[in-house]
Amino acid sequence: MFIVRWFLGRIILLLNFIFTPKKRKRPQDEQTMIDAATEQLALYQYKACPFCVKVRRAMRRQSLNIATLDAKQDPHKSTLVSEGGQAKVPCLRIEENGEIRWMYESSDIINYLDKRFA
């Protein structure tokens, strides 16, 4: 099973590389404001997870510079479990007004990003 998952993961990464979406073009001052807003966000993810790839592609289409953290490695893995409550990816850590929220579903994450940065 490990070999099958490893092989499928590499296919997903290859297809993502070949069919990389284009970045959205914005005026420089608008992009600077969005970059400042995305500093409060972090995506916990696995590199070859298809749902994580889906979220990263949405981030690229919108030109969002959100930090991506490998949830397989400590300390990110332990932070995800201890603060987020689940070892599930993709997970978007959202810090707003001193409060921290954890969003787990790829479709929910993409909808949130679409609404916030449209």
Image (cartoon, rainbow, N blue to C red):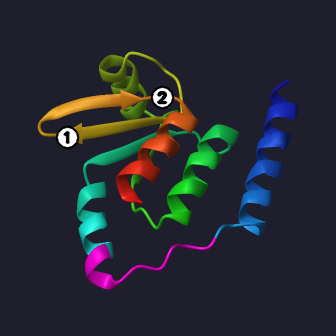
- Marker disc for residue 104: 2
Q: What x and y, as percent, mark residue 110?
A: 51, 45
Residue 58 as seen in the image, left or right of residue 20: left
Residue bearing mark 1: 96
Horizontal side of residue 111 vs 35, given as left or right: right
Q: Position of residue 25 (x, y in %)?
A: 47, 79
Q: Is residue 79 visible?
A: yes
Q: Vertical placement of 29 versus 37: above or below?
A: below
**Viewed as shown, does residue 50 lie left or right of 106?**
right
Q: Residue at x 68, y 67 (%)?
A: 20
Where is 12 relative to 37, above or below?
A: above
- Work out which quarter of the rendered image holds the N terminus and state it: top right
Where's the C terminus, which quadrant? bottom left
Q: Kindly indicate the quadrant of the structure image that contains residue 38.
A: bottom left
Q: Residue 95: horizontal and vertical position, in percent?
A: 23, 39
Q: Residue at x 49, y 64 (%)?
A: 62
